[in-house]
Amino acid sequence: MSILTTLFKSQKISTKLTPQPVTKSAVAQTSPVDLSVFQAQAREIILNAKDEALKIKDQAVRDAKVKLETIEVESKSLLSKQQEVVREQEKIKLQARDLELEKERIEKIKSSLLEKSEALVEKLEKAAHLTKEEAKQTLLDEVKKSESAEVAKIIRQSVEEARSSCEETAKEILVDAMRAGATDYVAEYTVSTVSIPDEETKGRIIGKDGRNIRVFEKMSGVDISMDENPGEVRLSCFSSVRREIARVALQRLIKDGRIQPTRIEEYLERAKHDVERLMYQEGEKLCHAVGVYNLPQDLVAMLGRFKYRTSYGQNMIGHTLEETRIGIKLAHEVKANVETVRLACLLHDIGKIVDDVEGSHVELGVNLLKKYNMPQAVINAVGEHHEDQPFSSKESVITYIADAISGSRPGARHENVEDYVKRLERLEEIANKHEGVAETYAIQAGRELRVIVTPEKVSDEKITIMASAIRDEIQNTMTYPGTVKVTVVREVRASEVAK
């Protein structure tokens, strides 16, 4: 029983037993037997309380003794550790003093060796009658003389080996690149003719007093000819896209049978929408085929126009796809920037489908790419792929090489050689007709006409007029791909001979 319980019970009993104030009459009524019982109970409670207090006191003494012993043990342990730390500190101090003494000894030895070395160098200089630098230079000269012949021999061998192997290595790289450029794309050549089933259909196309055919030509921007072949309608237009829109619309009108001005306008609008959607899909397909996925949508749509564009008989989508794959392979081989080459090859001819601005396709392509904030390295490669400007990087050289491989490989382009020669001769003939022309040269595959005039016959003011006249005649009388740059050169020289 705990002391609290005992005290509580004793307090409870004592409370019960506490005599109430009584009157004399009450005391007189209490018997002696009851009083003795109460006294006995009180004595018993007091004895129990004393026993419990003694037990608590003994337990407290024992607990205090145990704690005191624990404290003494921990104190001894701490004292022992403190003494050990003091001993380690003393040991470290002794080691530090030893290290300092050793350092001083090493410095003395080092100083002594330096003095001896200087003394030996001085003795050698006096004996050889040369300074240290003079002796060093003499030794190097002797080594050069003895090894120069061997070095030259090694260099010659290396150059010969490089010359013998570089040509074969270059051929292997180019062949491998061309193999990587092989594509399963089938070039589609747009035939600008539409078959007509009978003469009645032909009459409906013409319309009353030629009304239908005039509306069709005006709204489509193409010329219609029905005289060359009775079974077909021939469409002619400088823009291959407009020609394709007209072809699709005319085919649908013939199938519908109801050919009238309102129908013509409706079908041309539908055909334009369908062809533009098809071109965007083709441009997207081309970009994905070469691994380009973040090109602006306007450029993707313009690349799709390559579907209806050919260069010397080579379809532009097939050429671009082939060139880009070759360029990527070459870039990997020579450790060039693959992404720059990929974009440059993909966009190198994009200026060819810019019809609303005059200029060469290189200039138009560069301006277009600047408009869309393409990387400068890509713009440089596009501007240099025909060597119009000096190459600024190896990526530009790779773009040029890939374009040349794709365009010049056998079977890529099938322009008639006779027509090609005639076009060059015609360019020179137009220039030669002007008075004062000394020589003319059609260069860059007919893209530029260089005219050299006699300075005594043509003044500086007249060369500008002559260039404009030649340009206008070429535009009005010839058909050619791209643009033709006319350059008139007037050069004055003075020379004397001293005898």
Image (cartoon, rainbow, N blue to C red):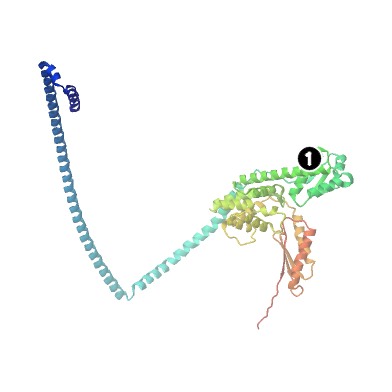
Seen from the viewer's position, the closer of residues 381 and 189 is 381
Q: Residue furthest bottom?
A: 499
**The image quarter in which residue 144 lies:** bottom left
Residue 263 x, y percent position in the rendering: 81, 42
Please name whichever residue, 257 or 34, is drawn nearer the observer in this view of the structure: 34
Q: Nearer the viewer, residue 435 or 288?
A: 288
Image position of 302 with respect to 69: above or below: below
- Residue 370 placement: quadrant: bottom right
Question: Up-down: is 267 above or below 434?
Answer: above
Quadrant holding the C terminus: bottom right
Q: Is residue 141 left or right of residue 454?
A: left
Number of marks in the rendered image: 1
**Crowding near the residue tagged with mark 1, few <14, some 14–19, many ≥20 C-alpha atoms within 10 Å:** some
Q: Residue shown at 70%/54% (left/top)?
A: 354
| Residue 47 in the figure: left or right of residue 292 | left
**Vertical order, 51 against 77 (above or below):** above
- Secondary structure beneath label 1: helix
Rendering quarter of residue 106: bottom left
The percent position of residue 341, horizontal first and vertical second, equals 59, 52
Residue drawn at x 12%, y 27% is 50
Which percent across, then down, holds residue 475?
A: 77, 59
Q: Report which residue position mark 1 lands on.
A: 252
Q: Position of residue 194 (x, y in %)?
A: 80, 43
Question: As shown in the figure, which amino acid type bears the numbered disc 1?
Answer: Arg
Instruction: Locate the N terminus and report the quarter of the image it occupies.
Output: top left
Does 358 appear above or below 313? below
Q: Is residue 103 visible?
A: yes
Res 172 visible: no
* Camera-side residue of 142 and 249: 249
